Amino acid sequence: MTAVLTMNTGSITCLHSGKLSTSSTELLQVNGKAVLLGEKIEEWNIKGCKTINNQDKGNQPCLRVTSVKAGFAQKLRVNNQPVILEAPLDWGETSGTVGGVIQPLAASVAGQTKLRAI
């Protein structure tokens, strides 16, 4: 079982120190913090990516999540949407590029261990 991500305790980052600006008002909470839902992840912006925009070299900072291929609970859902779980490196892609290569999301960290799911 893997820990569930919640507002203000966990983190989702790009490889270049950018952090997703998450939001959630869900009623399911852990220690007073709302869980993060998978349906919302592609709406969140990435702030603070350290990649310098240089289109001649194919470099563009990570500004948002473009796709996700893992990191969602199979069974724990809120309003039929999966909650987001801690996930290893490369569980999704960002809008950023380095040398023309699309950049992955870094590992996500839950920051809590009270609620876990599969």
Image: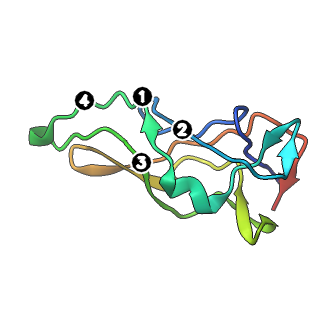
Q: CA distance from mark 2 to mark 1?
A: 10 Å
Indicate left or right for 48 with 13 as reference. Answer: left
N-terminal of the pair, mark 2 or mark 1, is 2
The residue identified by callout 2 is: 21
Vertical comparison of 47 with 85: above or below: above
Q: Nearer the viewer, residue 25 or 78?
A: 25
Q: Of tags 1 and 4, which is closer to the observer?
A: 1
**What colouring method underlies this structural image?**
rainbow
What kind of residue is marked 2? Ser
**Mark 1 or mark 3: whose residue is earlier in sequence:** 1
Residue at the image position 91 percent from the left and 41 percent from the top: 114
Q: Earlier in the sequence, mark 3 or mark 4?
A: 4
User: Residue 24: horizontal and vertical position, in percent?
Assistant: 68, 47
Q: Quadrant of the C terminus?
A: bottom right
Residue under the image location 83 percent in, 57 percent down: 117
Q: Which residue is mark 1?
A: 48
Instruction: Tell me the distance, in whole angstroms, between the alpha carbons under discs 4 and 2.
Output: 20 Å
Instruction: Return the residue at label 3.
Output: 64
Where, by quadrant of the figure, is residue 70 drawn? Answer: bottom right
Please state which amino acid type lies under the numbered disc 4: Ile
Kindly check if marks 1 and 4 are in contact, taking CB atoms under 8 A apart as contact: no
Residue 76 locus on image (x, y percent):
82, 64
Q: Are marks 1 and 3 in contact (CB under 8 Å)?
A: no
- Identify which residue, 45 or 14, lies in the foreground: 45
Mark toward the viewer: 3 or 4: 3
Of all residues, the one furthest to the bottom in this rendering is 80
Where is mark 4, residue-wise? 52
Mark 3 vs mark 2: which is more N-terminal? 2
